[in-house]
Image (cartoon, rainbow, N blue to C red):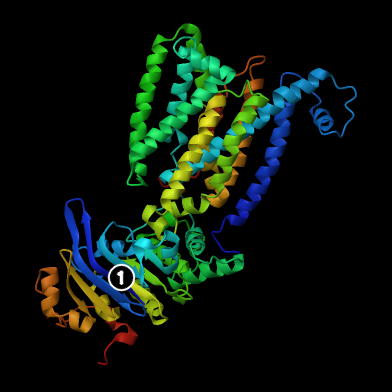
Amino acid sequence: MTVEAENLTVRYGQHTILHDIAFEARAGCISVIAGPNGSGKTTLLKALCGDLPHSGTIRLNGHDIAKLKPHQMAARRGVLAQETTLSFPFTVAEVVRIGVSAKSDPPVSRTWSDRLVTQALAAVDLAGFAGRFYQELSGGERQRVQLARVLCQIWEPVDDGGPCWLFLDEPVSSLDIRHQIGVMELAADYARRGGGVIAVMHDLNLTAMFADQVTLLSSGKVVTSGAPETVMSDAALSETFGCRLRVGVQPSNGLFVLPHSIMDHAAPT
Amino acid sequence: MPLQGDRSVRARFALAGLTVLLVLTMGFALQVGASDVPTLRVLMTWAGLDDGQGLKPVDMIVIMSIRLPRVIMGAMIGAALAVSGAVMQGLFRNPLADPGIVGVSAGASLGAVAIIVLGGTVLAPYSQFAGVNALPFAAFLGGLASTYILYSIATRQRRTSVATMLLAGIALGAFALALTGLLIFVADDLQLRQISFWSLGSLAGATWEKVVSIMPIILPALFVSAYLARGLNALAFGEAAAVHMGVSVQFVKNVAIFAIAAATGASVAVSGGIGFVGIIVPHALRLLIGPDHRYLLPAAGLLGAIFLLLADCISRTIVPPAELPIGIVTAAIGAPFFLWILLRRRGIIDL
């Protein structure tokens, strides 16, 4: 099962943001969209969510999204925006519970719903935050509360209707390194259990570490797409970002901290 | 162990408490008034539980024809104003929004003032046709018409822009105000007095006829808004996020705007401009039971009814035998109370 776009073109007024894009993401994988500012990453993700008028075809698990109703889409995919502000003083528990009530099969029993909220908060390392007000939290904490809310909406990565999808727009942008890795591992686990993950990412190291497939965008066009080992080359990255980049080069003073250095991923020394 | 930060249990207790309080308030409002009446016996007689011996006919009239329709109308209008306020605030994602934003009040005022000033001359055929209901009906039509115009302006390609509605609402409101001003300019002294009393609002003149005429508008609107709760909860996260959660946002907007226009229009038509209920009641409840619309909307209906009935009790007993316009009372109690809760809970009010 896939999320795919064919001949996707998106215009804002006179400006063409995406030119004739071909994109495919498979369930069971983390697919990363990377590229410089203004390259159309977020626009591509929004188009895949069904938020934008577009020409071309977008299919979610084989269904043309133009023909799907909001509630049918919501049963298949959850979307984490870059930043979410709330207009009213909700508590963390209430925010996450709204995600539970957006499930296609909302739990009947209160205990079950409470357990789901607790589990989702634990999954984003916010156990014990249920009683706090959303407005009192830091940016990174708010981002993780929203992730817990999105997770509740599509809690099972695969159900009778096929795989579910997490659409993440810069999910780690406001997080510290420990929570960056935590969130990426959560996404990897979701993909391992059969769900699909599509993430817009700025961090190339985390992309190299977690992505199964990378699409590089520049000026609204796909530069290249494929496994990170092939896509993340000196040439492709330099062309995409418009500056000279080299892969796998140590800084001269040896002072750098890569997310890879946490236990499981580090190469033997 | 119950989930921390989950205020739904508290909200259910509040709903039960408010229901009891509303019944008590209605009883109290029947009892309070210029003349002493054995209210309970009258009601029991009416229900066939008392033989009614020793009751004066005038007691029956005071309760059954004057106070009871007034209490029922007051409760309906209080509920309509408070629920409309809560729905508007959810729709506009702003705790300061009120039904006035969609142009109901400005349009209704224009309709009412037009009848007061021109009812004897230019609009005489209409006044004769509509009879005693000429004024409320004109106010209702004015409110609906201006809502419809505003809604059409803000809707492009079947998408309603809430921001355009807010801005265009200010412009249309100013325009309606200018027309109203023009009418006030040509009005005579008696008409001016009528206009200012109408704009202060009053439940005086409540009749069974009025109760029956607004009930089929207000009750369905209140009933329908209960179904908006999930959509409004999702809208608190923004329109895109609400769609992502499976909400048909345009449907929620359509239903909300027209339910609110109808409920507010009907209320303003029979009671004039009663301010402040739509802001203070939902706000106080959000502090008490949280912003979850599944509980907030019914609780706002109950507390709105209680608040307006108590304000009406004050308005008809404070300067006997005259009555103070109820708009003065709601604002005079409401404003300081509102400031008090604002200052007390400053921390979590995040505009």
When the figure is inspected, residue B189 is found, relative to residue A254, above or below; the finding is: above
**Residue A192 place in picture, x, y as percent:** 39, 82
The local crowd at label 1, few if under 14, some if 14 to 19, many if 20 or more residues have their Cα within 10 Å, is many
Pick the quarter of the image with the C terminus of chain B.
top left
Q: Give the left or right position of residue B33, taking residue A225 as reference.
A: right
Residue B244: in sight, yes or no? Answer: yes
**Residue B115 place in picture, x, y as percent:** 48, 17
Specify the subunit that label 1 lies on: A
Residue B336: in sight, yes or no? Answer: no
Nearest the camera: A78 or B255?
B255
Q: Give the left or right position of residue B172, taking residue B9 as reference.
A: left
Tell me the residue at 70%/43% (across/down).
B20
Which residue is at the far bottom?
A268
Tell me the residue at 70%/22% (across/down).
B66
Tell me the residue at 22%/71% (across/down).
A22
Residue under numbered circle 1: A199
Amino acid type of disc 1? Ala
